[in-house]
Each structure stands twice: as C-alpha cells, then as structure tokens.
Image: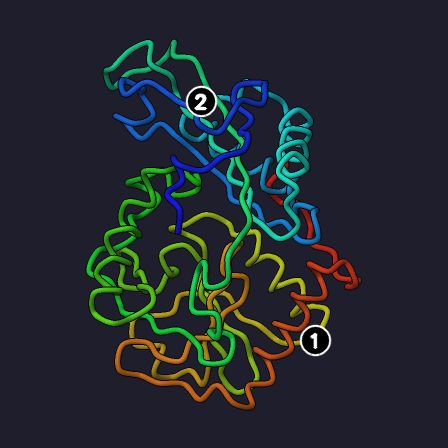
C-alpha cells in the first residue's frame, strides 16, 4: 500500500483545499505531543458518505470532551467532505476528519491554542481491514493484555487519538500471534470491543453485546441494533465476562471500516460460521441500509 504521505490529490485543511503534499503541521504541535486530537472515519458508498452528519456530530462531542471546540460548524465540514470526495472522484472509499490543538504552547495546559481541522479521503482497496474473503471465512480475535480504562480514569466517550494507543499495541500483538485483531476487556474483566470495532455475540437466536461504559457509542453499532429491531431479532445489552465467548454460538464485529465481519475464533474457542441466521440477516440488513434500500431509521444520538 502506498504510504499516505506520498499520495497525490487534495486535502481540506483549515478551510481550503490544498495539495496533498502541502497538508502539513509543525512537529511542535500540541496534538502530537499531548494527544489533544480527535477524529472520525466515514465510509463512502456510490460517491455518498454514509451517516456523515452523525459522524460530524460525534466529532464535535469528542472535541468538547477534550476541552476544545471545532473552529468550523458542521455544515462547513459537511461541504468540505463532499468537496474532497468529489475532487478525488471517489465512489467507494473512506473519509478521515481530524481536529487537533495547534503549536502555540508545548505544555500540558492548552487553554489558548488554536484548533485545526482536516478532511482527507481515499479509495478503499480490497482487504483494507481484513482478508478479502473474511465475510466467508471469518476473523480471529485474541484477548489483549491491556484493559480499556474505566470512565472514571479516562475520557472514554471521546473518539480521541490517545484512546487508540491501547488498540494499536493490542492489535500488533494479536497479528504477531497469528490472529486478525484483539478483544479488549475493561477494568472489571468484562468484554468491551475489538481494537477499532464493537463486538456482538449470538446465543440461541438472541443477539448479545456489551455496554459502552468504557468506550465510544458506535454509529455502526447503532445501525446493527436498529436493524435487529426491524428484523424482530431479540437482543440484550449488558456486561459479558471474559469467559462468555465460550457460551456463545456465534460472534461478529462491526464498525465503519470493517462493516460487519463474522468471527470464527476467539482465543481457543471456534465458531461454526454456517447457518447462523442472525448474523446473516444483520449483514444483509446492513448492506441494504448502506445501499439506501432499507426502511430502517437510525436516530442521531450524537447531535445533542
């Protein structure tokens, strides 16, 4: 894959489109040194960004949790994303929106720093998140060493760059061990999520998923629950302990980048991917939703 700093095209930076190579920030930027940075990833289907307004609303909430506000309103960022997609001629792709504190000070406190925003987009190649045949073969998860912190200890409801450090380490370890991703637990040894996606289980026709006590409220997760409502699939949201995967008869992860991917293995426990009606119906329902042919409505819970 071509490194991202060597690509061509245009990126929206602080209010204007600039050449890809000119979208730069100083090495003494607060967002780099103190992780005062938030982001969103948005999928593009048929040239249209999916649930863009929900993502932008969550971006502003994430920034406010980190004690800063965006310099641009959501309409401006919405137009910026559409402009970047159109400029690049993207039909099936991914948009990354970032906001971060500037370089006025390099110290912990940052009350008077500027705030910068960028919007970039690129086509998604096959196998970007997992193997191209992962829908058929499933992926594997290894339980991670590090835990997601309690909301008492970290701003877990912000989609902040710093909150993904644990995910990066954990996924690296999982990949080296021959797995595709890591399964993260919380401070009480309950299941939380994969490194960049929410996790669901099935058992006897019922859908089960952890609470979001220690993580962001997922947009794709909300889509799955709305589809389950529409399909009449019963579901339960609650604490699932580390041993629960052995009690389930199926599992999948979901997120903007990965969409819905079945899980074939968690640690030493394997799942039969054939004939899981719940997962099959949810995958079909999600594809209908992103294609615009579904009656399912997903409330925008992030615009408050």
Give the alpha-carbon distance from disc 2 to disc 1, as whole Å: 50 Å
Number of callouts = 2
User: Where does the image place residue 274, in percent across and percent down from the top left?
Assistant: 52, 90
How did the renderer colour the structure? rainbow
* One can see residue 304 in this view: no
* Image-based side of 269 in relation to 254, left or right: left
Q: Residues within 10 Å of mark 1 (few under 14, many from 20)?
A: few
Q: In this rendering, is residue 285 above or below 124?
A: below
Q: Quadrant of residue 131?
A: bottom left
Picture residue at 70% right of the left edge, 75% below the top: 232
User: Where does the image place residue 151, in percent across and percent down from the top left?
Assistant: 35, 44
Q: Give the position of the C terminus as an image quadrant.
A: top right
Classify mark 1: helix, strand or loop. Answer: loop
Q: Which numbered circle lies on residue 232?
A: 1
Q: Which numbered circle lies on residue 22?
A: 2
N-terminal of the pair, mark 2 or mark 1, is 2
Kindly check if marks 2 and 1 are in contact, taking CB atoms under 8 A apart as contact: no
Picture residue at 32% right of the left edge, 38% below the top: 162
């Amino acid at each position: 894959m071509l490194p991202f700093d060597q690509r061509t095209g245009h990126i929206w930076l602080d209010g204007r489109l600039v050449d890809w190579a000119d979208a730069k920030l100083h090495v003494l930027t607060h967002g780099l040194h103190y992780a005062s940075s938030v982001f969103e990833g948005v999928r593009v289907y048929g040239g249209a960004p999916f649930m863009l307004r929900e993502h932008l609303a969550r971006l502003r909430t994430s920034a406010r949790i980190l004690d800063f506000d965006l310099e641009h309103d959501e309409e401006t960022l919405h137009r910026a994303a559409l402009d970047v997609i159109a400029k690049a001629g993207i039909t099936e792709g991914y948009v990354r929106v970032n906001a971060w504190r500037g370089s006025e000070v390099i110290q912990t406190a940052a009350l008077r720093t500027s705030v910068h925003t960028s919007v970039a987009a690129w086509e998604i190649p096959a196998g970007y998140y997992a193997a191209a045949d992962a829908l058929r073969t499933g992926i594997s998860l290894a339980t991670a060493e590090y835990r997601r912190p309690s909301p008492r200890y970290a701003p877990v409801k912000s989609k902040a760059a710093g909150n993904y450090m644990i995910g990066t380490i954990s996924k690296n370890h999982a990949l080296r061990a021959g797995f595709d991703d890591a399964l993260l637990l919380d401070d009480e040894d309950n299941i939380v999520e994969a490194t960049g996606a929410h996790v669901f289980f099935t058992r006897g026709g019922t859908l089960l998923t952890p609470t979001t006590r220690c993580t962001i409220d997922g947009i794709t997760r909300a889509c799955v629950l709305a589809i389950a409502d529409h399909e009449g699939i019963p579901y339960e949201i609650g604490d699932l302990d580390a041993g629960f995967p052995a009690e389930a008869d199926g599992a999948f992860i979901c997120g903007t980048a990965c969409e819905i991917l079945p899980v074939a293995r968690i640690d030493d426990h394997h799942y039969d991917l054939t004939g899981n009606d719940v997962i099959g119906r949810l995958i079909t329902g999600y594809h209908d939703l992103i294609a615009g042919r579904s009656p399912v409505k997903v409330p925008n819970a992030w615009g408050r």
